[in-house]
Amino acid sequence: MLRKRVRLKTEELRLVNEILKSFVRYGDTDKVFDKVLQIFYSFWSIEAGFIALKDEDGNLRLHTAFGFLPSEIERAIYSKGEGITGLTYQLGIPLYATEDELLNKTGLLKRLCGKDIAFFTAPIKVGDKTIGVLGLFKDVSTSPVRVEKILETLSVVGSILGTYLGLKEKSELPPTVAWELMKNLDSGRLEGEFLFATENQRIKEILLLLERLKNLDTPVLFTGDNGVGKATYARLLHEISPRKRASFEVLDTRGLTPEKLEGLLEKKIKAAEGGTLLIKRIEFLPPHLQERVFEESKRGVVRILATAGRKLEEYFSQGRFLFDLYDLLRTFEVYIPPLEERREDIEPLFRFIFSKFRTSLSVYTKITPEAVRFVSEKPPKDNVRGLERLAKKLLTLFADKDLITLRDLELVEPSLKEGVGVVAVPKKDKKTFTEQLIEEEKRKIIEALEMTNYVKSRAAKMLGYTLRQLDYRLKKYGIEVKRQNQ
């Protein structure tokens, strides 16, 4: 069983890596999209597939298609909420449907009759805005499929396509930076895939600055609050530089004696020859080791990168930091802003991190949009590290649940109840606690139905109800069930 799971994971990573390579091999969007669909055919033997993008009228039109006739492509125009494709466009979530749930607006299914067709979709997003849909038709009778795994892989590809289109349109990031970000998405070489999930102009400017710094040998100092990802940006600078073929070494100064630090520093300098040495929390280096780092930076054999908190200037003013090294590091200082100053990034970032840990922990628990919004309104004090800690804690504690709710979040992080983000009922309504619970239950039921395309059996499972219990509540609350079609 373990061997099979590892093989499947490797196969999915190979698929994603092949797609990433297409962005470098082909500069034209049409060729890239054609190649993406061909890769899905090669790996998953799909019957047909498409990439649909938003047009000027706000509808979805097929930009690139595989396995469709020209007349079928002409009919493939979807408004928000129309069919499974339109529903994915509207909700911004991946969806799965069987053949009997599909509208067959294009007429494709008539040609595929006799096969057990399943339809998989994923949104194509730029930031948190859905600009298109990736859709695949697969004959599930030929081989067993894991729906969740397919949808998760499609979601990753959809994110990559969205990032590619966003960069293509704005032309804000040089190809080298964009490529390194995408290339390292699943390789594990960058800890912070969150670099993708940004709408903040300051972060984009930082990425541009790293592009300008990549060919230099001079030291660079990364500053900012705890948990903002300083080490990740340092690693990215190494990955886009000519030194990427050599080693990237990291020395963390915290909690080590001067004797231990001295031995580790010499070892790391030797290992990083021709490459890069990152010194984390450089302010904790003893003065004589600061001199050693300054000497090494002048040699230029090893490029010195460093991270520090905002108090490095205080260490210098107190005589605890070498002037020459301080002056050199300040020449190129990159300040990483905390999440508090880039709130628009928090929601897409948390979704990205949550999805990453779902995959690594092999669990299929989802989280309600309400809970995600709650986190974005009151981010952890330790920034990205805090989001990672929270996501891992939620998925570990509630791995047996189908859906993590706002109440689950408050149970795990009681401090979040205070201040911003607390969902309160307006005083003028004067609703009782029981009425609030009823409204909350109705909202969850409607949300689950929308997420499962109004398939009651799936919604019941997601909510933890039996089908009979769900039917009772639908009747009690007067909730109408309307199944969408493709």
Image (cartoon, grey):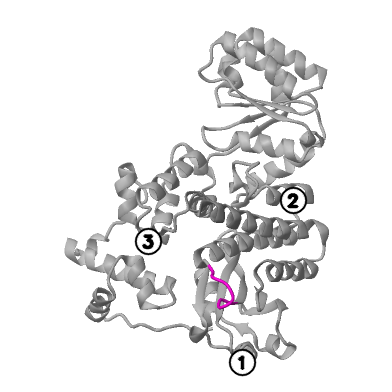
Residue occupying the point 72% across, 37% down: 237
The vertical placement of 48 against 372, above or below, is: below
Tags 2 and 1 in contact by the CB under 8 Å rule? no
Q: Does dot 1 land on a helix, a strand or a loop?
A: helix
User: Disc 3 marks which residue?
Assistant: 402
Where's the C terminus, which quadrant?
bottom right
Q: Position of residue 154 (x, y in %)?
A: 59, 64
Alpha-carbon span between mark 3 and mark 1: 35 Å
Which badge, 2 or 1, comes first in the chain's sequence? Answer: 1
Along the viewing direction, whichever of 4 and 246 lies nearer the viewer:
4
Q: Residue at image x 42%, y 83%?
A: 483
Tell me the SS state at disc 3: loop
Q: Amino acid at mark 1?
A: Lys
Q: Name the residue at 56% across, 52% down.
A: 3
Question: Mark 2 or mark 1: which is in front?
Answer: 1
Mark 3 vs mark 1: which is more N-terminal?
Answer: 1
- Of badges 3 and 1, nearer the viewer stands 1
Neighbor class of circle 3 (other Cα within 10 Å; few <14, some 14-19, many 20+) is: some
Q: Which mark is residue 110?
A: 1
Q: What's drawn in magenta, residue-wise?
A: 139-145
Q: Quadrant of residue 324?
A: top right
Which mark, by number, is residue 179? 2
Position in image of residue 342 (x %, y %): 54, 46
Check residue 320 for magenta coloring.
no
